[in-house]
Amino acid sequence: MGHQGSYSNTAADRAIRAIDRKREQERKHMLQTAYQHADDLAIQLVQKLLDEHIIETSSDKALKELISERLKKLSDMEEFDIQFKTAPLRGLVNDPNFMSLYFTQYVIEDLLDHPKVQDVFGDDATIYRAVDSVFSKIRPR
């Protein structure tokens, strides 16, 4: 009987490791794609936030540059920093897109204080849906 329990734990460990590998591959793919297409993604994201009336700004160009820079720097960030930034929103949706969580929190915390941003509207879920509509396109399925 002890052998069955050991086998069960081994099978569970293998499954957990497989899930972790899949998530890490997804993360690497998204970071690489975000870096390569930072300008296009920034344009799409700012346009979506403006179209959905989530953000009010005096300079969409400044926001596009800011988000493009952030997308390029994201791949150099420590995993801890990304996890820390996304922690308040992790329970927002099932199977969240880490990049969408990060930029949702970025809009809520950082862009709100930017001098070119007059205001941010909407609750966390509304902002996440808008952000995720852009970043879900680069998430492998």
Image: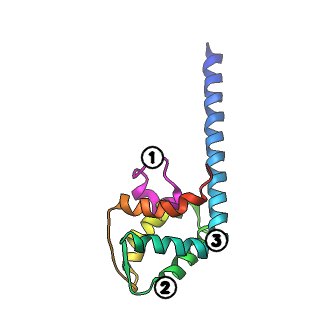
Q: Which residue is drawn at 64% across and 28% down?
A: 11
Q: Which residue is drawn at 39% across and 71% down?
A: 109
Amino acid type, callout 2: Ala
Q: Which mark is residue 94?
A: 1
Q: Tag 3: Cα neighbours inside 10 Å, few (<14), some, or many (≥20)?
A: some
Sequence-first tag of 2 and 1: 2
The spot of residue 116 in percent (x, y) is 40, 85
For label 2, the SS is helix
Task: Give the color scheme: rainbow, by chain, secondary structure or one colour.
Answer: rainbow
Q: In which quadrant of the rendered view does residue 6 lie?
A: top right
Q: Which residue is drawn at 66% across and 58% down?
A: 28
Q: For marks 3 and 1, give the CA distance.
A: 26 Å
Q: For marks 2 and 3, give the CA distance.
A: 17 Å
State which region is magenta.
Answer: 83-100
Q: Residue 37 carries which label?
A: 3
Seen as rendered, the residue at the extreme top is: 1
For label 3, the SS is loop
Say above or below: 51 vs 115.
above
Number of numbered discs overlaid on the protein picture: 3
Q: Nearer the viewer, residue 7 or 44?
A: 44
Decide: marks 2, 3 in contact (CB < 8 A)?
no
Q: Which mark is residue 62?
A: 2
Q: For marks 2 and 1, give the CA distance.
A: 32 Å
Say above or below: 3 vs 94.
above
Q: Residue 13 carries which label?
A: none
Q: Is 8 positioned to the left or the right of 112 in the image?
A: right
Seen as rendered, the residue at the extreme front is: 51
For label 1, the SS is loop
Sequence-first tag of 2 and 3: 3
The verdict on residue 92 being magenta is yes
